[in-house]
Amino acid sequence: GFNLSGRDFLEMDDYTSEEIEYLIDLAIEIKAKQKNGEVYQPLKGKTIGLIFEKSSTRTRVSFEVGTYQLGGHALFLSKNDIQLGRGETIADTAGVMSRYLDGIMIRTFGHDKVVDLAQYATVPVINGLSDLAHPCQVLADFQTIYEHKGVLKGLKLAYIGDGNNMAHSLMIGGAKLGVHVSVASPEGYEPDPQVVASAQEIAKATGAIIEVVRDPQDAVKDAGVIYTDVWASMGFEEEQKAREVAFASYQVNEDLAKLAKPDYLFMHCLPAHRGEEVSKGVIDGKHSIIFDQAENRLHAQKALMAALIGN
Ligand code: CP
Ligand code: NVA
């Protein structure tokens, strides 16, 4: 096995390919335990704090439920209810919380805040989404793909749309796992070139292919997975109108999906906007595995918490 005890989880590149594969295997094992009604409580007596500076449905509920199922206790800490929202520093927040808690999850805007929290906290910090990365989602996503396809290496995943946190973590995670990730974004909305370069560097060791293209058709051609996300992420709401124009030809719909493999999977981290980044027919159709993905947030994060914080 792997000893990940005490580690942070800020982005997919914090972990080796083998460690990520281990976490996916552990998630599948923990999922089976839950389905079999087996009690598994490595977090007995432990408490985890969940700091939210942005909205959440899946992340909040899956962390709260997951912690409970592992025998621990989770505290929902909304920005507006803790002193962080009134200007208490990240360093002081981290120092204080480390004296009460066994782990901290944070969802925030700038990734530097996640990094600072991890630096000042003496307990593991988990990134529950920043503007740069969404590694918990991607861990669950690769678990989901693996469950459906039985393989990750060599698989082509097309990501269509905004070069955002999801695009970044899919590229880094895909690079680690030997996946062919092809990202198609409109001009001005490409993924961060530094993240692309770093994913391409990782890919050299794993045989993954990481590419950024302009035309969604080039990305989707022969893909086994089509992934998309909202055009305006949290924090970018005021750009909605401009983005609707820029992304108009980036909708994942039946026409585009025709270019993928006949047994392609459609994925979306949710929440989704039907009629914008994806047509109703595709997201609600037979290729869509959005609820498997959402469910696996629970199992993947239980694996993560068990490995980082568990007894
Ligand atoms: N996918 C995801 O992270 O969803 P929430 O914003 O609802 O947590
Ligand atoms: N890119 C989206 C993902 C939401 C889970 C956002 O950051 O709002």
Image (tube, rainbow, N blue to C red):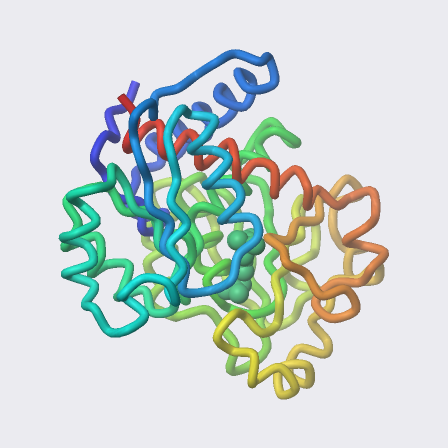
All told, the count of numbered labels is: 0
Q: Compared to 172, does 37 lie above or below?
A: above
Q: Position of residue 295 (x, y in %)?
A: 61, 37
- Which sits in the foreground, 47 or 32? 47
Q: Nearer the viewer, residue 260 or 17?
A: 17
Q: Position of residue 155 (x, y in %)?
A: 58, 41
Q: Quadrant of the C terminus?
A: top left
Would you say 221 lies left or right of 7 here? right
Residue 253 visible in rendering: yes
Asked if residue 195 lies left or right of residue 222, the reply is left
What residue is drawn where x is 47% and y is 26%?
69
Q: Residue at position x 47%, y 34% from top?
A: 300
Q: Position of residue 174 (x, y in %)?
A: 47, 46
Identify the residue shown where x is 50% and y is 43%.
Answer: 179
Residue at (59% x, 67% y) in the render: 184
Q: Quadrant of the N terminus?
A: top left
Question: Which picture quadrant has residue 265?
Answer: top right
Residue farthest toward the front in the current orientation of the protein: 81
229 sits left or right of 173 in the view:
right
Q: Position of residue 203 (x, y in %)?
A: 38, 48
- For the residue pair 98 and 33, the one nearer the viewer reads as 98
